[in-house]
Image (tube, grey):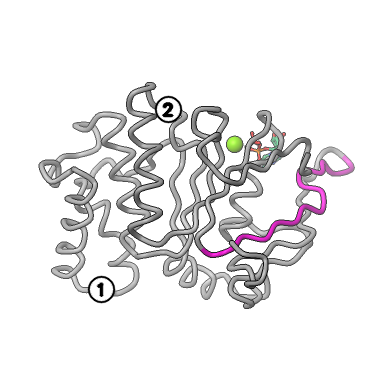
Amino acid sequence: MSSGTSPILSAKRISKSYPQGAGHLDILKEISLDIHHGEAICIVGASGAGKSTLLHILGTLDRPNSGELSFGGRSLLSMADEDLSLFRNQEMGFVFQFHHLLTEFTALENVLIPLRVRGVSKSESEDRAAEILNTLGLGERFEHFPSQLSGGELQRVAIARALIGRPQILFADEPTGNLDSHNSAVIQDLFFQLKESFGLTLVVVTHDPQFSRKFPRVLKMSDGRWV
Ligand SMILES: Nc1ncnc2c1ncn2[C@@H]1O[C@H](COP(=O)(O)OP(=O)(O)O)[C@@H](O)[C@H]1O
Ligand SMILES: [Mg+2]
């Protein structure tokens, strides 16, 4: 977090627009952000401000129209999609508002997917998925399908899937937006516990003030810019 160290993720003058009619609609307007290793950053702002768009670009799930993005000094936007996927699989984890688990797979099978994509053996992937599900209090839920899990459990499985590959950065887009207040509080605390135990850098979008006030650094967006 100290200003003396170089950022783990640096975004400079990121712009994003979508075609609209004969012209285009500007969503992100030359937005910049430096994220240091071990930081916990919260991004807030009204619906439509561009928070999800920015998070997707920071996480290399989407590309900007212009600007620069680097990770540990390595430029990301010049990388081919295939190399970027591999990089993302190793360094970044994602949690969304909706769990996006595969309905025909069990909790254990959902969690081990990122390791299988990476070429880790089935047995090692299963062992590591079991370990992280245990860590997240889901030791009794390995064989459950998503339809058999509660909202809070689904989100914990999604978090396990995001972390099994030991990413450096965890991105979360409204991760408690679909939960009741009790489960929301549980998941909020979990993020900070996992940040410590996994040595994560955390970038979270939320509109829940109970969640945002727990962050040392809160950035507010409005109409594609920082306020
Ligand atoms: N694929 C798209 N095509 C056109 N407009 C989009 C697209 N994705 C998002 N937008 C627009 O970009 C703006 C910002 O969206 P978003 O980043 O999802 O905002 P937030 O997450 O802050 O609510 C919205 O006005 C939305 O309609
Ligand atoms: Mg959004």
Q: Which residue is mark 1?
A: 120
Q: Position of residue 94 (x, y in %)?
A: 45, 52
Which residues lie in the magenta part? 22-37
Question: Where residue 97 is drawn, which disc sits there?
Answer: none
Is 139 drawn above or below residue 119 in the view shown?
above
Task: Give yes or no for contact between labels 1 and 2 (Cβ–Cβ under 8 Å).
Answer: no
Is 221 drawn above or below residue 115 in the view shown?
above
Residue type of the residue flagged with mark 1: Val
Residue 93 lies left or right of residue 76; in this view the side is left
User: Circle 2 — which element?
Assistant: loop
Residue at far right of view:
22
Q: Any magenta on residue 79?
A: no
Identify the residue at horizontal 33%, vertical 62% (top origin). Answer: 114
Residue type of the residue flagged with mark 2: Asn
- The N terminus lies in which quarter of the figure? bottom right
- The C terminus lies in which quarter of the figure? top right
